Image (cartoon, helix red, strand yellow):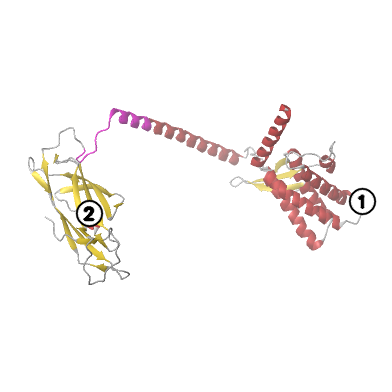
Amino acid sequence: MRAGRGLLLLAAVCGLAAAPAWAQPADDSTAVDGFRCWRRLGQHAVRVGERFTMTVTCSAVETARARAVPDPVALEPASIDVAPFEVLDGERFEDTRTGPYRFFQYHYTLRVISETSFGEDVELPALELTYRIERRIGNDPALVGRELTYILPPEPIRIVSLVPDAVVDIRDLPPATFGESQARVFRANAFTLGAALLGLVAVGALLLGVTRAARTRRGDALPIDTPISLPRVVNHALAELAAVQRTTAEHGWTVESSARALAALRVAGSVALTGRVAQTRVAPDTPTRDGQIRIRTGLVHRQTMVVSSALTAAALTAGAGGPVVPAVGDARLSTDLGQAISTFTSARYGRSDTLATADLTRALDTGMSGLKRLRWQAAAPVRAVVQLRTFAREWNIWRR
């Protein structure tokens, strides 16, 4: 029944040093089977097409002196031969070690499709499993023995009869239950309703686009003004100051460059003080007037906006108990912007013909530093967090 049973020397209980290659095994060594397998069936009588399970468990001895090395290819679900039975699926579980033994196990799902085996015993064929014995003596390399074969004997299975009408897992999928059918109808209705709503949205968007296109062709399209976000306004003001800085570094300070810097600082000061700024849509060819900053916005519908402010330095610095607390930013930012606006106002509208270039450069640097802080402080999430903290602080003071 078994061919080529491999015998190896189990040295787990051997406390002596390794013997020479020509020496005989010590008396306290025990001879055991190097490789063994067992097969277990879920049932021994099945109907044609009925699924049943088969489990193959093998043990391989592994010690410091010798070990059995099996070839698992013959047990893989994709390559195992159990004809006339059919392997539907299979898996290998994680190996387990117990003393000198390493156990590994495969689990399969089988069935048989046959029209001529009713009332007969059909054998699961024998499995021929190959393995080798590796022996190690001292620190020498392992010596691999010849290929051995372990034969797992066949096992008969009784084919009772055809599968009854109640069993529907031979070839076709089982019919759905009432609950599954109702669930599918509900999902279908929900998807249909969602598709109808999305279709209405698409039709509405199409009609809106056609209406706007018709108004544009007739020349009576309404202006669509989208307010520019505060961080973007501050960013354009900062870009204007950077342009003034490059111009003055090459050509020096002039009244015009002072006016450009003053307009940008006033816009930024209005954002800091009140959290808003005047925005007006103009035609693309409209010239920019004194005190205005031009901003192009929109990806599809391009718009030209101008922002401006008439803010004075006194509005930022003339607080009753000290510096004014702005709506965006902090008191230091309010003071820095107020001083910079005051310096550029004197240069723009003063009667002196000589410009204090050092003071203007210093005020420009201070304004640019303040706008860099204001740019991220003006973002909506940051302003929301600041307002929440202020509310929490005032709430704690009121509770006291």
Image quadrant occupied by the C terminus: top right
Q: Position of residue 190 (x, y in %)?
A: 40, 31
Amino acid on which disc 2 is placed? Leu
Which badge, 1 or 2, comes first in the chain's sequence? 2
Q: Is residue 185 magenta?
A: yes
Task: Give the SS element for disc 1.
Answer: loop
Tell which of 49 and 200 is nearer to you.
49
The percent position of residue 8, horizontal first and vertical second, equals: 22, 61
Location of residue 31 with respect to 230 vertically, above or below: below
Q: Is residue 205 visible?
A: yes
Three-letter amino acid code of the residue under disc 1: Arg
Q: Residue 211 falls in which quadrant of the image?
A: top right
Which residue lies under the disc numbered 2? 75
Residue that numbered label 1 is attached to: 351
Disc 1/disc 2 C-alpha distance (Å) = 101 Å
Q: Is residue 180 above or below residue 78?
A: above
Which span is picked out in magenta? 169-188
Q: Where does the image place residue 275, in percent across and percent down from the top left?
A: 72, 39
The answer to whether residue 283 of the structure is visible from this angle is no
Q: Is residue 111 rendered to the left or right of residue 306?
A: left
Q: Vertically, is 131 above or below 125?
A: below
Q: Position of residue 177 (x, y in %)?
A: 28, 30
- For label 1, the crowd category at 10 Å Cα-Cα, with few meaning under 14, some 14 to 19 and many 20 or more, is few
Residue 93 drawn in magenta: no
